[in-house]
Image: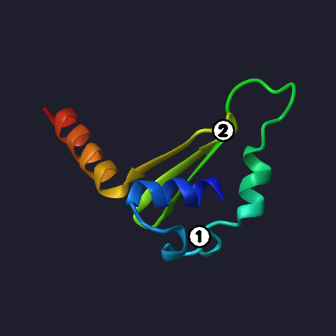
Amino acid sequence: MAVIATLADVRDTDPVDLTPLHSTVDPDALDALVRVRNGTNGDIHVTFAHEGHAITVHSYGVVTITPEHELTADNHERGRDDDV
């Protein structure tokens, strides 16, 4: 629910207008992977693409969403800088 709510907010749209998350990733499996676990150190996170965005869900409760075109531009700029 948090992923779709956050993505809807980023896209300034109603959550019901988005493609269902289960068409990209199994929401129950995602919850199981990133659920906060007592006694674990570090972050467990999962990144996937949905609705033209790269979405990362962290076990410490943060969801980050980046438009895929920004990732492509960033990778292109890095590649160009590496060639110089």
> Picture coordinates of residue 38 (x, y %)?
87, 29
Q: Quadrant of residue 16?
A: bottom right
Q: Going from the N terminus, do you reach mark 2 or mark 1 first?
A: 1
Q: Amino acid at mark 2?
A: Gly
Q: Which residue is mark 1?
A: 24
Residue pictured at 24% horizontal, 49% vertical: 73
Q: Quadrant of the N terminus?
A: bottom right
The secondary element bearing badge 2 is classed as loop
Residue pictured at 48% horizontal, 76% vertical: 17
Front in this rendered view, residue 2 or 54? 2
Q: Mark 1 Cα within 10 Å, few/some/many (few <14, many 20+)?
A: few
Q: Which residue is mark 2?
A: 61
27 lies left or right of 6: right
> Picture coordinates of residue 13 (x, y %)?
42, 66
Q: Quadrant of the C terminus?
A: top left
51 lies left or right of 36: left
Q: Amino acid at mark 1?
A: Thr
Front in this rendered view, residue 16 or 35? 16
> Picture coordinates of residue 69 (x, y %)?
29, 56
> Up-down: is 47 above or below 22?
above
Front in this rendered view, residue 78 or 20? 20
Q: Nearer the viewer, mark 2 or mark 1?
A: 2
Residue pictured at 29% horizontal, 45% vertical: 75
